[in-house]
Image (cartoon, rainbow, N blue to C red):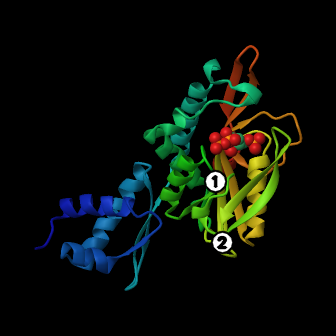
Amino acid sequence: MKVRRSERLIDMTRYLLERPHTLVSLTYFAERYESAKSSISEDLTILKKVFQSRGTGILETIPGAAGGARFIPYILKEEAQAFIDEMADKVADKSRVLPGGYVYLSDILGQPDILRQVGRVIATQYLNQKIDAVMTVATKGIPIAQSVATYLNVPFVIVRNDSKITEGSTVSVNYVSGSSERIKKMELSKRSLTEGANVLIVDDFMKGGGTINGMKTLIEEFDANLVGITVFAEAAFTGNRLIDDYTSLLRVTNVNDNDKAIKVVPGNYLEKVFGAEA
Ligand SMILES: O=P(O)(O)OC[C@H]1C[C@H](OP(=O)(O)OP(=O)(O)O)[C@H](O)[C@@H]1O
């Protein structure tokens, strides 16, 4: 039985939002709603306009027999800026200061609504780039990687600091933990990445950059390509930071575990993604 437009629009919206970066054919929708392709095209035009005006994302419409629609989630600069400012206020709490210049983030990055926004913000930075996998290191980076991977609709791979029989054969690299000057090892299952894969690195926190640098080395070992590095927060680091080309949502500019002082400002995300006037 033919489905009314109001019902089609609601169901199409859900269907497309659950399948970001995926081309859904006109034929599929026409059969799903037992409606003419011309009606579906009109539906998609309505969705395209509303998604754009409400800042939901881009609805690419591809014409022709093999045509269809592809939903690309993004976040508008104003919404991203408001979220980053809100996170800066949340993190700038002296009770979060940890020894060694680290900051306690697990409560913030354990909240689904915050993780959803973090994923949307980071995915927006890479929406026009070919990403085959999102990489992070266990443990605290995992929820961020899962959220970004959901918005980009690609797998995420987890680098580990310990060997597990359940990971099968692995590639391992030694790296200098930038903060502690200690040699550490990280490894990734050989099944995780294929040669030439385009990889995005994400993590919750960067201080000396040694962890990120270790993941960069792993990507080289797989003959894969590093597309970008984005972290939720970076700490001011006076040493020789091992990473120079990265993006951060927040920057912890002043943290002192003696007097528990902490100052948090927006990182370089807004400028890198939306331009200098951000
Ligand atoms: O830039 P660096 O000086 O290398 O530090 C950044 C590391 C340290 C910390 O992880 P840990 O707390 O060591 O590990 P886990 O995420 O498993 O808690 C954080 O999640 C980053 O991965």
Single out the residue that lies furthest toward the left: 1
Query: Mark 2 and mark 1: span between their CA atoms?
Result: 15 Å
Q: Which residue occupies the foreground of this view, 96 or 16? A: 96
271 horizontally vs 88: left or right: right
Mark 2 / mark 1, whichever is N-terminal = 1
Q: Amino acid at mark 1?
A: Thr
Which label is found at residue 136? 1
Q: Can you say whether 186 is above or below 82 in the image? A: below
Residue depicted at 55% across the width and 41% down the height:
80
- Which residue is denoted by mark 2 in the rendering? 197
Quadrant hosting residue 265: top right
Q: Can you say whether 211 is above or below 29 in the image? A: above
Residue depicted at 70% across the width and 59% down the height:
187
Q: Quadrant of ligand 1?
A: top right
Q: Which residue occupies the foreground of this view, 23 or 93? A: 93
Residue depicted at 53% across the width and 40% down the height:
78
Residue depicted at 81% across the width and 52% down the height:
175
124 horizontally vs 6: left or right: right
